[in-house]
Amino acid sequence: MSDPGGPLPPAIFHGTVDQIRARHSSVKWRFHPADVVPVWVAEMDAEPCRPAVDAAARALADGDLGYGWYPPLIDAFRDFAERAWGWRPRAAGTVVVADVMTGIAELIHALTPPGGAVVISPPVYDSFFGFVASTRRRLVTAPLDPRHRLDLDALDVAFREAGRDAMYLLCNPHNPTGTVHAPDELAALAALADRHGVTVVSDEIHAPLVHDGAVFTPYLAVAGAERGITVTSASKSWNLAGLRAALVIAGADAGPAVAELHEVVRHGAQHVAILAQTAAYRDGGPWLAAAHAELERNRALLTALLADHLPRVRVTPAQATYLAWLDCRDAGLGDDPAAVFLTRGRVALSSGLMYDPAAGHGFARFNYATSPDVIREAVARMARAAG
């Protein structure tokens, strides 16, 4: 967790369903009809981080709307990472790209051969599946173990199948399970990847959202990960998804690999986004601390409400993110409980099948980065839908 850095602001998550809908026009609130309560896509229903807003507003007011200048963002992230995790990434070999998944797609193109393989560990962020398909690479899976942790035996088999020059997309922390990978797990992964000639690319977009009692470890901070690459952004933790920019960070021995990214790839980050994310990393500590405290309360509220009203729906123990992975297999809701909740209850969750088409039956993902009123309404509707 980042340092608070000052007094905490007022409540960040507040409002009824109608009040939040009136002030939000993003895909989360507009994709479904107006009678649906949305707790699906990973956007926050939050009051904004004021330093980020001020930076963006100042640029708009001043007409500072040219192409992005990214060195300040790199410096701000390095300072933040050192404060938050005791890790100071190298400036050399760090570049700015449009967003995390665009950066990952470009790395796939640059570092794996046409028709080569990319390994992922489901249940995992659904866009991993789509971007592997979009790059015309072969998908190989190494599922998490029953405790939702990295399965080194499965990874060994998958890396062997994928072949040398393959890539492994690590989700760190893991979405949707909320797993925070331990240093020994990451070190073992690095050794295994090195043995098989596999490049590890770590998506660390949720890293600042680790719960109390858990400790985030950057992949590049562990011994043996020097060939790895991290891709990250302030977009999830400070709710800046509409202001697109991300960092690609090379491990100590991965500079030549990141240099394979064509220079034009670095043109995609928006100038206003760079300014806003720089301000978030530098001055957004109080906002992040307040959001973290409220998210802890929201998680406890969701868990209690489900225990009272839907006891056969279990919340997977998590260490990070604002996303709850719900095990609905004993609730009699079929393979896709999210579809049942939407049809019968008019509440939109994300389907577990998106994160694991092979074994996601009976699961759904609930985004609790919203107001307590919305959480209560969503669970009440879910309970009615389940009968």
Image (tube, rainbow, N blue to C red):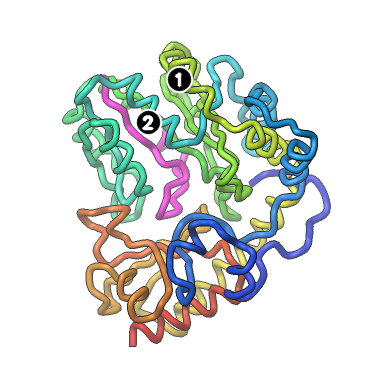
Residue type indicated by callout 2: Ala
Query: Tag 1: Cα neighbours inside 10 Å, few (<14), some, or many (≥20)?
Result: some
Which sits in the foreground, 184 or 89? 89
**Image height check: is 375 above or below 75?**
below
The quadrant the C terminus occupies is bottom left
Could you tell me which residue is drawn at 16 percent across and 30 percent down?
Answer: 161
Which sits in the foreground, 213 or 138? 138
- The answer to which image quadrant residue 162 occupies is top left
Does label 2 or label 1 sit earlier along the sequence? 2
Q: Position of residue 371 (x, y in %)?
A: 61, 69
Q: Position of residue 43 (x, y in %)?
A: 53, 55
Which region of the structure is painted magenta?
165-186
- The answer to which image quadrant residue 168 occupies is top left
Left or right? Give the position of 196 relative to 42.
Answer: left
Q: What is the number of the mark on residue 105?
A: 2
**Secondary structure at numbered mark 1:** loop
**Image height check: is 178 above or below 217?**
below
Which sits in the foreground, 288 or 19? 19
Query: Tag 2: Cα neighbours inside 10 Å, few (<14), some, or many (≥20)?
Result: some
Residue at the top extreme?
A: 256
Which sits in the foreground, 164 or 98? 98
Alpha carbon separation for disc pair 2 and 1? 21 Å
Could you tell me which residue is drawn at 20 percent across and 33 percent down?
Answer: 138
Q: What is the number of the mark on residue 226?
A: 1
Asked if residue 128 is among those painted magenta in the image, a careful observer would answer no
Residue at the left extreme?
A: 161
Could you tell me which residue is drawn at 30 percent across and 78 percent down?
Answer: 331
Residue type indicated by callout 1: Glu
**Image height check: is 387 above or below 52?**
below
Q: Position of residue 373 (x, y in %)?
A: 60, 76
Q: Position of residue 283 (x, y in %)?
A: 76, 41
